[in-house]
Image (spheres, rainbow, N blue to C red):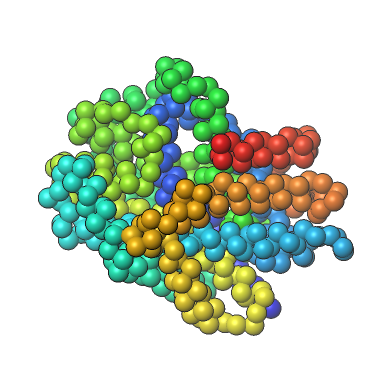
Amino acid sequence: MNQREKFSSRLGFILISAGCAIGLGNVYRFPIITGAYGGGLFVLIYIAFLIILGLPVMCAELAVGRASQRSIASSFDALEKKGQKWHLMKYVGIAGNYLLMMFYTTIAGWMLLYFGKYLTGSITTIESIADLGTHFGETVSNVWLILGGTVFTILACFLVCSLGLQKGVERITKYMMMLLFLLIVGLAVYCCTLDGAVEGLKFYLIPSVDKIADSGIVTTISAAMGQSFFTLSTGIGSIAIFGSYIGKDRSLLGEAVTITTLDTFIALTSGLIIFPAYFTFTNGAALGESSASAKFLFTTLSSIFNTMPGGRLIGCLFFLFMIFAAYSTVIAVFENIMSFWLELTNLSRRKIAAINIVLLIVLALPAVFSVNIWSDITVLGLGFLDLEDKIVSNLLLPLGSIVYILFCTTRYGWGWDNFYSEVNTGNGLKLPRWIRPYMTFVLPVIVIAVMVLSFI
């Protein structure tokens, strides 16, 4: 196996790990369901679940990655005891990463196309939501256009990974994430100066018992629990790989808290863009969880951009921000895929990139075609794109998280003592010893509950 690379700085590790966690769904879906499920009260419930659910799972993934110095392709092999079968998890992880990229690269391509539409101004004359819905349908029905956006995304992101960890992944992602933060803060400041900003912020941030009563407390709690779990992308080794690239000078709980804080900051700040603009230009028309889909970006938000002063520039910057959010995740997962191959073969990064470019383009075709020429084909009532999303989000992520937790906390796996020593090595926040019963017995039950509720 090739000599393992390392991050050149802690900042690189933090920003790249946060980039992996910051996904498109988190950026646009979180603000909408926050408004639908009680505003500020939902945020508090969500943050509580991030602490009791998301952080322990992230710590487990990071610990396995750092202790093994491997990706999910061989990390369990390196740490498990003789005769154990934890290494079978590699197949779930590898499949999960490929399946995630099969549909995610397609959606990232949509963001690229809409950035181009605002850059050229070709979409700015369409103002009604209905007409924009028709335009979106025409866009995704264009097979070659959607395929082109997907192929460009795969080529660009594998090119970054082929340059190496420090020269490619770390360098490019650091600049991309810093620009992402500047864009989102700038857009939020601008949108908070709009006429309807106060009403929008009230809807978004002020706790509303009435909204929770309308939705039901159980539905609200399950929504917060599910969002807190899926937002961090834990369970398929996408976070563990970056643990394998860092040293032992910092404790892993502190690093997990920093990554989670950045992820939550982006999610919360996205609402400072969406709701002030929404209430200014739509008079606060009703929003619900049914609004929390990618189509919201291309219809409702585009309608807002196209009717506001300077909307072309704002739309251009917004979709540039969405590209950065999408590409930071794609590059992070591609790096994980790259690491599988580096550990299991003797191929160079460039050869691995070339092979996987062809492989991912072929694997992405069902998602590309599911919104046009294969739109009538469904499995369990879902098109290929939605089915792939459902399998990853509702099955593989929670299943993988359960495996990581049990592997780290039980004597039948790596074991609590080994995990506890690894996670607390270095300066920073320490995981308390009293949390062991919770992580061993309670946390797996919560994750299973999330998995079941997500299917229900």
Q: What residue is at 80 percent from the left and 54 percent from the top? A: 414
Residue 130: image location, x then y, percent? 20, 42
Residue most extreme to the left: 125
Q: What residue is at 43 percent from the left and 39 percent from the top? A: 30
Residue 194: image location, x then y, percent? 21, 33
Q: Is residue 453 visible?
A: yes
Q: Is residue 327 visible?
A: no
Residue 3: image location, x then y, percent? 66, 77
Asked if 442 appears above or below 427 in the picture, the reply is above
Q: What residue is at 21 percent from the left and 28 percent from the top? A: 283
Asked if 369 appears above or below 55 in the picture, the reply is below
* Quadrant of residue 291 within the rendered picture: top left
Residue most extreme to the front: 376
Residue 22 relative to residue 194: left or right: right
Q: Quadrant of the C terminus?
A: top right
Residue 383 relative to residue 253: left or right: left
* Quadrant of residue 305 within the rendered picture: top left
* Quadrant of residue 195 within the rendered picture: top left
Q: Nearer the viewer, residue 31 or 378?
A: 378
Q: What residue is at 39 percent from the left and 22 percent from the top? A: 206
Asked if 373 appears above or below 304 in the picture, the reply is below
Q: Nearer the viewer, residue 198 or 135?
A: 135
Q: Nearer the viewer, residue 33 or 182?
A: 33
Residue 160: image location, x then y, percent? 45, 71
Q: Quadrant of the N terminus?
A: bottom right
